[in-house]
Image (tube, rainbow, N blue to C red):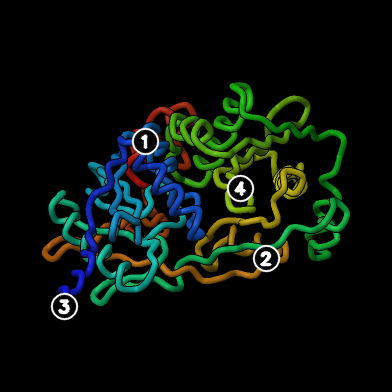
Amino acid sequence: MNAPFAMTTETVRLAELSQPDECARIEGFVALHGGSVFHRPQWLHAVERGTGQRALGLIAEKGGALTGWMPLTELHSPIFGRTLASSGFAVNGGALALDERVAERLIEAVEELAQRLSCSSVELRGGPARAGWDMLTERYCGFVMPLAEDDEAQLAAIPRKQRAEVRKSLSPELEVTIGREEGERAAHYAVYAESVRNLGTPVFPRSLFDAALDALDADILTVRHQGVPVSSVLSFYHGGAVMPYWGGGTYAARRLRSNDRMYYELMCHARRKGCIAFDFGRSKTGTGPYAYKKTWGFEPQPLTYAEWTVPGCEARDADPLSPQHQSRIAAWKRLPLAVANRLGPLIARGLG
């Protein structure tokens, strides 16, 4: 009698992200298994090109077929230390696997990789974790809602009080443009940089936004008043949903209600592009952005993140709500915009 065939061994290894064929395999796996835009190798490459932070990833395979994938960014900052994030500069990530056993192997492998790379910690922004990890279940919430069938129905779907604000924003004094060309990119960066400075946060390098626009299905929607950009958002389109990701407004935006106009116009634009859902992204529980998204009728859904600190190392703390950062944030708000825009990218490229 012939001996039975040996079971095919499942292996976990570093992905060869410099190889187009490897990336294509992973892209197919992400699409087939409902991964986010932040699971895509294209996202990792865009982050690497835009910030200099290294793109990595772990794949599990069996018999030549992928069974799991974990996207990673190796983040290094002289202020916040070195960490592995899944995924860097993202609100989603973690292990994408055929079953819990494969996910467990990927998580075990990322612990080993972190120690080999002298990282102090690992952050999984989604997906499963394992025993010994710190689970964050109440820090962030996501906000997703189906898009309506037409512009009027979209307006009617907004709760009454917020709908009244949107109606007031539908003024001919506000001009809306959508595109990806240099003029739109420059306008977006100017608005976004001012917006985050006003919040006390260093701005990301513009190269990150350019790299994301060049690599992914994305565009910029800008609202102008008398020719001056007052609100602008860079959005991603993935899996039938639009996600306004990097957006903000100037001091004039509140008076003009241009942010309200911006998000309503994006909903209508996304539906015309074929999207069926609006992903308002994540917000920290109990913050102003959290409350603002609820006024639009979005129901918060808790997000589960996980963190692991290498034994003997200190936990990384890059949370802007952390008490130890409050004095820095207050000082940053007072910086002249030109100074903040010059220094911000040097710091923010290490935040991830």
Q: CA distance from mark 4 to mark 1?
A: 29 Å
Position of residue 167 measured from the top left corner of the image (x, y, whole percent): 86, 51
Badge 4, how many Cα within 10 Å: few under 14, some, many 20+? many
- For marks 1 and 2, give the one nearer the viewer: 1
Q: CA distance from mark 4 to mark 2?
A: 14 Å
Badge 3, how many Cα within 10 Å: few under 14, some, many 20+? few
Q: Amino acid at mark 4?
A: Pro
Tag 2 secondary structure: loop
Q: Front-most of 220 and 197?
A: 220
Among the 4 quarters of the image, the one containing residue 300: bottom right
Q: Are marks 3 and 2 in contact (CB under 8 Å)?
A: no
Q: Amino acid at mark 3?
A: Met
Instruction: Of the two numbered discs 4 and 1 on the same chain, state the one appearing first in sequence.
Output: 1
- For marks 3 and 2, give the one nearer the viewer: 3
- For marks 4 and 1, give the one nearer the viewer: 1
- Above-or-below relation of 142 to 351: below
Residue tagged 3: 1
Q: CA distance from mark 1 to mark 2?
A: 39 Å
- Above-or-below relation of 228 to 143: above
